[in-house]
Image: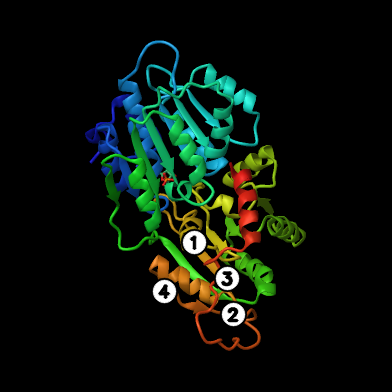
Amino acid sequence: MPFKNLGIEENINKILKEKLYTKPTLIQSKVIPLVLDNKDVIAQAQTGSGKSASFVLPILQNLFQKEVEGKSKIKVLVLTPTRELTQQIASLFSEFSVNLPKKLKVVSVTGGSGIGDQIYKIQQGCDILVATSGRFLDVLSKKQMNLSTIECLVLDEADRMLGDGFIEELDLILESIPKTRQNLMFSATYPQKMKELSQKITTDATEVKVESETLINPNINQRVIEVDKEKRGPLLRYLIKKHKWKSVLVFMANKRATDNIALKFRKYGFNSASFNADLDQELREETLEAFKNKEFNILFATDIAARGLDIDNIDCIINYDLPRSPSDYVHRIGRTARALSSGDAISFIDYESMDHFKLIEKRSDIKLKRETIEGFELSGDAPLKVKGPAPIKGKKKSKKDKLREKEALSKSN
Ligand code: AMP
C-alpha cells in the first residue's frame, strides 16, 4: 500500500519519493493511520525497521492540517536518550517538511552546546522541540518557554526513557506539560516493568507490535567467537583484514578503553577513532559525521552509540566487551543491517563472560554456535563451576557502576 493510501498528503509524498521511500515499512503502515487519528500508541519493532518515519510523517501531516497563523508555538515534544539521536530526529522533521506551505520550526535541545542559544531559538518560534531529557529540564528551569500548547509527546527509545536515571527526569517533565495530549512511545525492546510504566503515561493506547519470528532483525548475521581478553585486539585486526570490512563499529565497556584502542589501531596503520561521552560536543559531531561518510573505517564506541543511530552500510558490529543488558545487545547489533540491508555482529567471549552471554541469548531468544579462530583459541582450562547460581555480570550493579552510569548519563544528555 503506498504512503498516499495511509493518508500522507502530496507535499510530504514528494519528499518520500525523492528519498526512495517507495512504500511504507510494516511499522509505518500500522502506526501512521493511528497517529493521524490522534490515538496514543505504544509501538515495538525491530531496530532499523523505519520507526522514526512512522511518527515523523504523521506528526508533520497533523501539524500541517492544523496550521494556524502567527508565531509558532511548541506543539510537539520529542524526548530521546542521546544527543545524536535528538539531532537525527530533528533533521528528519526538517527534511520531510521542506515542501509544506508553512515552514515548520524544529529546534533541537541537547547538552554540549550553549543553552542561551537554544532558549533564544525556542523563543523565536518553535513547532517541534526535540530534546534530551536532561537538557530539556535545564531549559525548563529557566522558566522561559511556554509548554501549555504541547499537543503531542513522543518518547523515542522509550524503554531507556523509562529506565533508571531517566524516569525521575521524565516525571518532572510530565508535570510541566498539558495532561491532555497525544502520547507516542517507540522502542525495539520493552521489558515488562516498562510496559506497566508506559500504561501510566498513555491513555487507551493502541499497542503495535510488528509481528516477526524473532526480536532481532534476521538480516543480522550473529556470531560469537571465543577468545582470551588480551587477544581480542589482534583477532579484531585479523578479522578486519580478512573480511576487508570498510566500516566497523566496535562497542567497549568504558570511555578510556575506546580512546586507548583507537590510538593503538592507528599505530598499526588502521584508520580508527573513538566515540564516547568525554569528547566535546563538536568533536562528537565531527567524528560521527566522518564515520557516516566513511572517512575512516573503525569506530570504537561506548553504549552512547548503541541507540537509534542510523548509519548506512556498517559491515560489522563487534561486541569487544559484552553489553550489560540483553536489550543493549539488541540495540547495539541493530546498528547494522539497516533498511533491509545485511551485516555481521560478532561478540567476543571468554570463560569469564560465557554465563553472561548465555543470559543474553536466553533473553533475546537466540542460540549461537561458539566459534574459535585458529591461532586465537582460549588458553587454559575452563574454571571449575562453584555450586549455586553463578554471579551473573549485569544482574546487580555495584555502587561504582551506578556512579559511573550516573556520570555517563549526564554527559549523554
Ligand atoms: P529507523 O528504524 O527509523 O532508524 O530507519 C531505518 C532506516 O530505514 C533509515 O535509514 C531510514 O531512512 C530507512 N527507511 C525508513 N522507512 C523507509 C521506507 N519506507 N522505505 C525505505 N527506507 C526507509
Kindly identify which residue carries mark 3: 348
The percent position of residue 298, horizontal first and vertical second, equals: 63, 55
Nearer the observer, 161 or 171: 171
The type of residue carrying mark 4 is Lys
Kindly identify which residue carries mark 2: 351
Nearer the observer, 23 or 63: 63
Residues at marks 2 and 4 touching, judged by CB atoms closer than 8 Å:
no
Depth-wise, is mark 1 or mark 3 nearer the camera?
1
The type of residue carrying mark 3 is Phe
Nearer the observer, 379 or 391: 391
The type of residue carrying mark 1 is Tyr
Q: Earlier in the sequence, mark 2 or mark 4?
A: 2
- Going by the image, does 279 lie left or right of 23? right
Q: What secondary structure is marked by label 2?
A: loop
The type of residue carrying mark 2 is Tyr
- Going by the image, does 382 lie left or right of 34? right
Kindly identify which residue carries mark 1: 329
Q: CA distance from mark 2 to mark 1?
A: 19 Å
Image-quadrant location for residue 24: top left
Depth-wise, is mark 2 or mark 4 nearer the camera?
2
Nearer the observer, 175 or 303: 175
Q: Earlier in the sequence, mark 1 or mark 4?
A: 1
The percent position of residue 92, horizontal first and vertical second, equals: 45, 34
Q: CA distance from mark 2 to mark 4?
A: 17 Å
Q: CA distance from mark 1 to mark 3?
A: 12 Å
